[in-house]
Image (tube, rainbow, N blue to C red):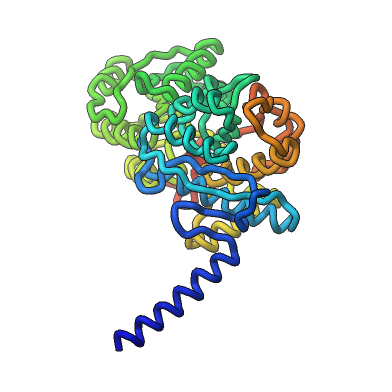
Amino acid sequence: MRIYFARYFALYFARYFALHFVLGIALASQVSFATKSPDCTKIGILGEFKSLTRGFYQHFGTETRRGAEVAVKWLKQKNSRAVCFEFENFETDNSVANLPRIIRNAAANGFRLFIGLGISDQAMGAKKVLEETGAILISPTASSTELLGQQGRIVVVYPTNQIIGHSLAQQARARGIEKILSVYVSRGRYSEDMHRHFSDEFIRSGGTLETVSIRPQNSNFNEVVEKIKKNNFQFVFAPLFEVDAARLIAAVARHSENIEYVGTDSWGTYSKVIRRLVKNEKLKAMVPKIYDPEFKTAENQYLVSEFAKDNGSKLPTDLVAFSFDSMLIAHALVQNCPKLTARTNVANCLSRSLPISSTMGLLKTHENLGIKREIQTKMILFDDPNLQVNVR
């Protein structure tokens, strides 16, 4: 019996690995979407695959990989002679301190292009080593304006904090919000940056704004509650990652009723935790709608359809969608600048590569490596059972 099973499993695994070898898919930490070849362009996927990304209920590395996988299928479907790519996952272990070593070692092994690092603090942590190695990072969802630069090595696919913050402030003022309390994380690059851009525009347009800074993953919101009560605030601006946003909503709900929020993209795409909290309290929130699964581009319809096949009919998050777009950008860069080196002017190469059709329409131009795209804001009542919240 043991011999029979041994032969059975040996035959099974021989066939299994032979099949995947033909398909060119690596089954270990490396994930190749094309047969290995000296002519293939190596792309490293940077992010968290084993652990949740800090501040979120998601594995950013896994989500990035999912978007890239579908994009490669799309490229091959459109053009069987599309550029050959060889992908490998690089686990960051949720530590910015690991990035210089990871990127330096990968670059020494021939990786010139990376996709990932969807948080601004992470992408900023890679900035110096990218310049040192001459490698290029395409970040799907990092959004700090500090990442931009005409001579930089980071392509920012997501709308910047300046664009989102100004848009939210303008919409808040247009909806009659005169006074607002901003609660942000001190020394959090994303949170401080978004707070600054929103505040500048809100005050410039005649609004009144007060602030409370908190620590990351804070559980004490007494100062926020006291300020709401003392100054009779009805509106709170919360540029927080979804874990902190959930804690804030829960704490405020215990003491204050009828608070309405201006949230940001960092609240978490389809975050069940936040949705459940605000639904129970019947609260309102205005959030930016960065990605729409129902948008009628060929790229987006393909992404939604293919993603659902492998993920139980789930809709892709904006991280998945902009990882898909990042792969399209990577393909265009390689086509227009076949030999990516440390001397490659990324801004010039990107200019030659645009326009590119993407999930949310045509990507026409960039400014200092920040892709320009339109965004929408929408007043959302979270207790609507048919609601789809499109935030990161």
Q: Residue at x 50, y 38 (%)?
A: 106
Examine the rendered structure and indicate whether residue 309 appears above or below residue 300: below
Can see residue 206? Answer: yes
Image-quadrant location for residue 221: top left
Image-quadrant location for residue 121: top left
Can see residue 317? Answer: no
Please indicate whether residue 182 sits to the left or right of residue 325 in the image: left
Please indicate whether residue 120 sits to the left or right of residue 78 in the image: left
Viewer-proximal residue among 117 and 225: 117
Q: Position of residue 194 (x, y in %)?
A: 47, 22
Examine the rendered structure and indicate whether residue 1 appears above or below residue 266: below
Q: Residue at x 44, y 36 (%)?
A: 102
Please indicate whether residue 147 sits to the left or right of residue 276 in the image: right
Please indicate whether residue 234 sits to the left or right of residue 350 in the image: left
Q: Position of residue 327 (x, y in %)?
A: 62, 44
Q: Image quadrant for the N terminus?
A: bottom left
Viewer-proximal residue among 65 and 381: 65
Q: Position of residue 283 (x, y in %)?
A: 38, 37
Q: Residue at x 60, y 23 (%)?
A: 152
Image-quadrant location for residue 301: bottom right
Q: Position of residue 233 (x, y in %)?
A: 36, 20
Count of labels in the image = 0
